[in-house]
Amino acid sequence: MSSQPDLRMSRDLLRPSLVYQGNTKQYDRLESDVRTHVATSRTLVAIQRKEISLLPRPIKLYSEVVDATERFIEALAEIRVLRFSVPRKSTVFDIMPLRTQLVSQPEHLRPKAH
């Protein structure tokens, strides 16, 4: 599920614009869906906490996994907001001059590949 935003953001890198212009409605809908699934998971953990069972269940571990997932989703959302608000020019380094310089250098001056 987390690969969908990554793929969309990667495709946005290929677009020639000064600022990342992702489809915000698409990202917002996807983020809303993920938050809904996290809330559903939290509800299921709460239901399991109240159920009587003959076998012990790791309810605390389930809660910790849901909490960690929620923190991870928050971090991804913050990264997305930052990425779309920073001008592309200041985040993408123009490597063309470096490549032409590297190619025009004599063989013995080029950096060695490891």
Image: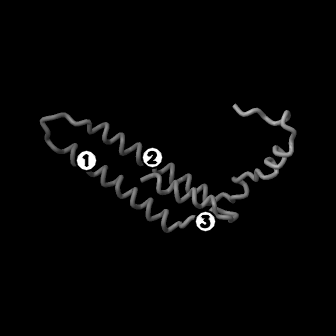
Residues at circles 1 and 3 in contact by the CB criterion of under 8 Å: no
CA neighbours of label 3 inside 10 A, class few (<14), some (14 to 19), many (20+): some
Per the image, label 2 sits on a secondary structure element best described as: helix
CA neighbours of label 2 inside 10 A, class few (<14), some (14 to 19), many (20+): few
Per the image, label 3 sits on a secondary structure element best described as: loop
Q: Residue 14 lies in what quarter of the image?
A: bottom right
Determine the residue positioned at 56% across, 57% down. 9
Q: Which residue is mark 3?
A: 21
Per the image, label 1 sits on a secondary structure element best described as: helix
Instruction: Name the mark nearer the viewer: 3 or 2.
Output: 3
Separation of residues labelled 3 and 2 (CA atoms): 25 Å
**Left or right: where does residue 30 sit relative to residue 7?**
left
Determine the residue positioned at 82% across, 51% down. 97
Image quarter where the C terminus lies is: top right
Residue 15 is situated, as x and y percent measured from the top left of the image, at: 64, 64
**Left or right: where does residue 98 sit relative to residue 14?**
right
Q: Amino acid at mark 3?
A: Gln
Sooner in the amino-acid sequence: mark 2 or mark 1: 1
Separation of residues labelled 1 and 3 (CA atoms): 39 Å
How did the renderer colour the structure?
A: one colour
Q: Which residue is more in the foreground, 95 or 103?
A: 103
Q: Amino acid at mark 1?
A: Ala
Determine the residue positioned at 26% across, 46% down. 45
Q: Which residue is mark 2?
A: 71
